[in-house]
Image (spheres, rainbow, N blue to C red):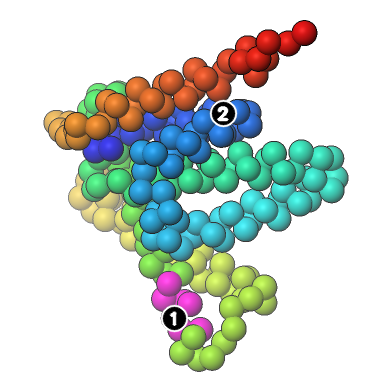
Amino acid sequence: MQDIRLRTGVATLLSLIAFLSIPGAIAAFFWWMIFTPNLHLVLKYRLVLPSIALIGVFSIILEITGGGGLSYFFRMMIVILIGIWFLSGQKRGEFLNLGCWLFGNRNGFELGMLAEMALQNLNALTIDFDRILAAERMKGIRSGLQSIIPVGRVLIHETLLRAEDTAELLAIRGYIHGGTCVPVFTREKGDFVAAFFAVCAAVIAMIPVSAFFILS
């Protein structure tokens, strides 16, 4: 899905229905299986499995303390899959175009630029994480629980340094607020079809289960 407007709307809608109910999560999962590269996305992004594992830990704690952990795990897993699909099609400048299209060249430019910077930092974090893993393999260090704190410290430190460099660059260039951007959007033939079935999935998810059966 090339149009960032449709992709954002579809991702938001499917994430909401997946988070709110099991039927919504099932409907979103079927949409994800049909209209995305599905398993290829999971293999492409290395942070998918660690994210699911982290959600699994919280789900176990929730199941032990109050119940509902399995439901939470399934729903959050679908939300993660939708989020990975959303980010996989992202191209540089799309969020800036979307922000200016929604809110104009002042506030929209500001929000779009913040989104672009956040995504840039996310990509940089992924690269840093891969480099840390490569360094551990070269040194014969096993990745495990004992390395979580040092790795986290390095990632946070690098992120703060990049934020400081970006702030200095904007200040040197005299940036204050807003800017000018002419939004440009591209579409594929299947964009509207996928968006239509996403809406259908949301409608189906909101229909009570009893409506599909004749109950005595």
Point 24% across, 48% down: residue: 92
Q: Is residue 110 in sight in this rendering?
A: no
Q: Position of residue 62 (x, y in %)?
A: 78, 45
Picture layout, residue 124 above or below residue 98: below
Name the residue tied to disc 1.
134
Q: Is residue 100 in sight in this rendering?
A: yes
Picture layout, residue 100 above or below residue 84: above
Residue range corresponding to the magenta coloring: 130-136
Magenta region's main secondary structure? Answer: helix
**What's the amino acid at mark 2?**
Gly
Give the quadrant of the N terminus. top left
Q: Quadrant of residue 215?
A: top right
Judge whether residue 59 is colored magenta.
no
Label 1: state its secondary structure.
helix
Q: Nearer the viewer, residue 95 or 75?
A: 75
Label 1 crowding class (10 Å Cα cut-off): few <14, some 14-19, many 20+?
Answer: few
Disc 1 or disc 2, which is closer to the eye? 2
Point 63% across, 43% down: residue: 74
**What's the amino acid at mark 1?**
Ala
In this image, 16 relative to 194: left or right? right
Instruction: Tell me the CA gap for discs 1 and 2.
Output: 39 Å
Q: Nearer the viewer, residue 28 or 133?
A: 28
Label 2: state its secondary structure.
helix
Point 34% across, 54% down: residue: 120
Q: Residue furthest bottom?
A: 139
Judge whether residue 133 is colored magenta.
yes
Name the residue tied to disc 2.
24
Point 74% across, 43% down: residue: 69
